[in-house]
Image (spheres, grey):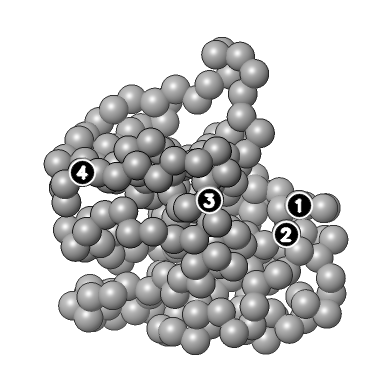
Amino acid sequence: MLDRPYTFINSAMSADGKISTKRRKQVKISGKADFDRVDELRATSDAVMVGIGTVLADDPSLTVKSEQRRQRRASMGLDENPVRIVVDSQARTPTTADIFKKGSGKRIIVVSRAAPQERVRALAEKAEIIVAGEDEVDLRAMASELKKRGIGRMMVEGGATLNYGMLSNRLVDELSVFVGNLIIGGKDAPTFMDGTGISERSEAVELKLVRYEPMDEGIVLSWKVL
């Protein structure tokens, strides 16, 4: 049995692998069918996680959009929305962020021990706080703590640094990526995976393609992490 949640990353990227513009602003990549697919993934997850960069750039609410799906969760004795988690080493999440203003359900902010205590205290009025790691969040320790708190299935929605951090620490079981019909370009535009990267081919994380589905003038690719 895993000592962490079963975890999958979901993202949308351009045909050249970019997830936002060079100014790190969100751009529409997929369409209605993919939005509905993502909403179902959220509705069937115990938690949805993003990094602080995504919160600061896009201010997502991470809620389940479909009323029918929210009602289905409620009928099962669950909150209407999955637990919303932000990985935020320095406690920079604004207390006015949409995750606090929109939708019911639990919020968790994961910080490091180096996070300024006045910011941690302010966030503690809005969310549960998990402390993991010294200067940066220790993702493995965080994952173990989330499992202890009853999170069995977790969806990661980026951004690029968190995606790579989770994958390189072997904390991911699946990847699901919508590849859209546009080119964004730019060496400063974030890709699906950023972080430190590898030096040798032998260090690469191997994947097995398990599904592919044309959708919204693009394609959804699903891999198992080997």
**Residue behind mark 1:** 136
Q: Residue at x 57, y 44 (%)?
A: 188
Q: Splitting the image into 4 quarters, where does residue 128 fall?
A: bottom right
**Residue behind mark 4:** 218
Q: Is residue 221 left or right of residue 226?
A: left
Return the x and y of residue 174 as percentages of the image width and height: 38, 39
Q: Earlier in the sequence, mark 3 or mark 2?
A: 3
Q: Is residue 26 left or right of residue 77?
A: right
Give the CA distance from mark 4 to mark 2: 35 Å
- Crowd band around label 1 with a 10 angstrom C-alpha radius: few (<14), some (14–19), many (20+): some
Give the CA distance from mark 2 to mark 1: 5 Å
Determine if residue 3 is in view.
no
Give the mark toward the camera: 4 or 3.
Answer: 3
Give the mark toward the camera: 4 or 2.
Answer: 4
Q: Earlier in the sequence, mark 1 or mark 4?
A: 1
Give the CA distance from mark 3 to mark 2: 24 Å
Q: Is residue 66 left or right of residue 86?
A: left
Return the x and y of residue 19 as percentages of the image width and height: 43, 49
**What secondary structure is marked by label 2?**
loop
**Residue behind mark 3:** 22
Q: Earlier in the sequence, mark 2 or mark 1?
A: 2
